[in-house]
């Protein structure tokens, strides 16, 4: 099956970005946008992306279901970032500094966290995805975020 690489015409649009569970070894991320009915659909896949005005979401209900299914249970997409896709072609040297590594592990955390400190992160001015590594820059909030996503669960 051919992998649908994201068309650059989607740059500048508001999108969802999440790690593609079907290609975890390839470092691919899925990019979703809304269709005319307002429903999300996959637009394509990227190894690299730069986004601005980013918010991180975790559906706690879906996370709980994944935890209940155990090690061999079926995984589902329950964590993603939303923001405006700037580009897929960028030089890491030109990114805003400092860059802060982030991660999400549903078994350990209920939110995205800073890799080194473990502090929860909910928003960022910029998100950079470079193959397997994910970074934020100019973070704007590390306190509790009131959005609960049971309706996405």
Image (cartoon, rainbow, N blue to C red):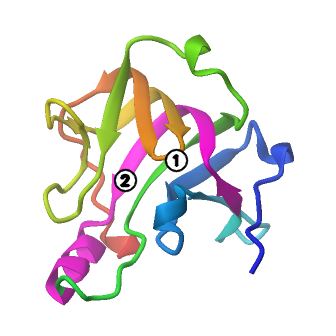
How far apart marks 2 and 1 lie (CA) works out to 8 Å
Could you tell whether 109 is left or right of 80 in the image? left
Residue 58 counted in the magenta span: yes
Question: Residue 14: where, in percent of width, then height?
Answer: 66, 45
Label ID, residue 29: none
Residue identified by numbered label 1: 82
Question: Does 73 appear above or below 35?
Answer: below
Question: Residue 57: where, in percent of width, then height?
Answer: 37, 53
| Rendered residue at 29%/27% (across/down) | 141
Question: Residue 93: where, in percent of width, then height?
Answer: 57, 13
91 or 76, nearer to the observer? 91
Question: Do the residues bearing badges 2 and 1 touch, measured as CB atoms within 8 Å?
Answer: yes
Question: Does 126 appear above or below 152?
Answer: above
25 or 3, nearer to the observer? 25
Residue 54 counted in the magenta span: yes
For label 2, count other residues whose C-alpha is less than 10 Å away and answer few (under 14), some (14-19) or many (20+). Answer: many
Q: Quadrant of residue 73?
A: bottom left
Q: Residue furthest right?
A: 9
Q: Quadrant of residue 134?
A: top left
42 or 89, nearer to the observer? 89
46 or 63, nearer to the observer? 46
Helix, strand or loop at label 1? It is strand
Could you tell whether 21 is left or right of 148 in the image? right
**Image quarter (top left, top right, bottom left or bottom right) of the C terminus:** bottom left
| Rendered residue at 61%/41% (across/down) | 48
Q: Quadrant of residue 76?
A: bottom left
Residue identified by numbered label 2: 57
| Rendered residue at 16%/65% (across/down) | 107
Question: Does 152 appear above or below 6?
Answer: below
Q: Which residues are magenta?
A: 44-69
């Amino acid at each position: 099956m051919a992998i649908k690489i994201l068309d650059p015409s989607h740059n500048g649009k508001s999108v969802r970005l999440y790690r593609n569970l079907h290609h975890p070894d390839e470092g691919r991320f899925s990019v979703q946008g809304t269709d005319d009915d307002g429903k999300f659909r996959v637009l394509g896949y990227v190894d690299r992306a730069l986004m601005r005005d980013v918010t991180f979401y975790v559906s706690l209900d879906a996370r709980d279901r994944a935890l209940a299914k155990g090690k061999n249970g079926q995984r589902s997409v329950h964590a993603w970032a939303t923001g405006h896709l700037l580009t897929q072609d960028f030089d890491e040297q030109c990114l805003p500094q400092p860059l802060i590594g982030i991660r999400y592990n549903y078994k350990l955390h209920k939110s995205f966290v800073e890799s080194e400190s473990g502090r929860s992160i909910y928003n960022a001015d910029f998100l950079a995805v470079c193959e397997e590594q994910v970074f934020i820059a100019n973070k704007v909030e590390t306190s509790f975020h009131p959005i609960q996503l049971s309706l996405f669960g």
